[in-house]
Structure formats: structure tokens, C-alpha cells
Image (cartoon, grey):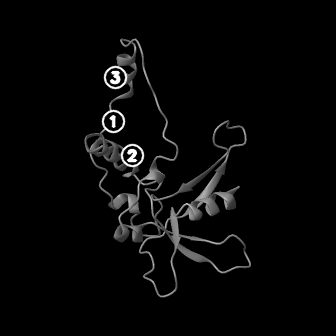
Amino acid sequence: MYKDFMYEYEHSNHMKLVQLGEQQPLIYLPHHHVCRLDSFSTKLRVVFDASSKMDDWCSLNDQLYRGHKLQKNIVDVITHFRFLALVFTADIRQMFRQIQVYGEDQQFQGIVWRDDSSKPIQSYRLSTVTYGLFTSPYYALRVFKQLAPDE
């Protein structure tokens, strides 16, 4: 399942192989999978750990500006729902993965991966907003707020 996720991630252009001679990413994010076989919707989830620290270094999340809180308080949203005759909700599949990261900023989202222990480790750049970054929820909501007047 983990290999399938990584293959799909690469074939969707959500991560790109760093070719020999290209500038290597400056920051590499550890990643691992979490399996929940009892889960109805998502049996496997891949975690990119932008909060991990190496020795005396700070993490990527320590260096990121989180941005302003754009979402409303959930209690206010639910209370408001009670006064409406009709309510629509939606769930955007893979919301973070729909947002491309600016090319120069992809160097801060590196991972290493190999699908077989007999093969060499390869370096990749994640090209979309990544789960595990403190800034990801802000990016997603900010994109929606911008798309509303643009579209």
C-alpha cells in the first residue's frame, strides 16, 4: 500500500525525481506510513514530518510563518447551521495536493525514497502543498479566498 501511494504521488506529479546534476533539496522531510485497517475512508496515510529536528538544528516548521487564522471557529459554524433551512457541505479530495508550490520553494520539501532495498536511494522534491507543514491549512484556505473573487 505504501509503495502504491508513492507511485501514485509521483505519477500525479506531486513529487518529482531530482536528476543527477540538479540542485539537491536543502531540506529533507522524514516520512512514514500509518496503517489503520479499521478505517472506512483512509486505510493508509503517509505522514511527512516537518517538525522533526536533527541534533541542534531547528525543524522546517520552526522556520515557517503560519499565517493568520482564516477559518471560522467550528462552534460558530455549527451554531450558524442551526438557523438555516438548508446547509451544503463539501469535502475536497486531496485538497493540499491540488495546490502547486512555487518552483524555487520546492527545495524545502525534499524526500528520499526507494521502492526496493536493493536499489539506490533517490532524491525527490514534493511539488504540492504538503501534509505536515504548519502552513498548509493557511495555504489551502488562502487559495480558496483568492479563487472566490477571481473565478
Q: Are marks 3 and 2 in contact (CB under 8 Å)?
A: no
In this orientation, does residue 14 appear? yes
Amino acid type at circle 3 is Asp
The dot on residue 107 is none
Q: Which residue is mark 2?
A: 137
Q: Are marks 1 and 2 in contact (CB under 8 Å)?
A: yes
Measured as percent of width and height from the top left, residue 23 is found at 42, 82
Q: Does dot 2 land on a helix, a strand or a loop?
A: helix
Amino acid type at circle 1 is Gln
Q: Which residue is mark 3?
A: 76
Q: Which residue is mark 1?
A: 71
First along the sequence among labels 1 and 2:
1
Amino acid type at circle 2 is Pro
Residue in the picture at 64% in, 63% down: 7
First along the sequence among labels 3 and 2:
3
Measured as percent of width and height from the top left, residue 142 is found at 31, 46
Q: Does dot 1 land on a helix, a strand or a loop?
A: loop
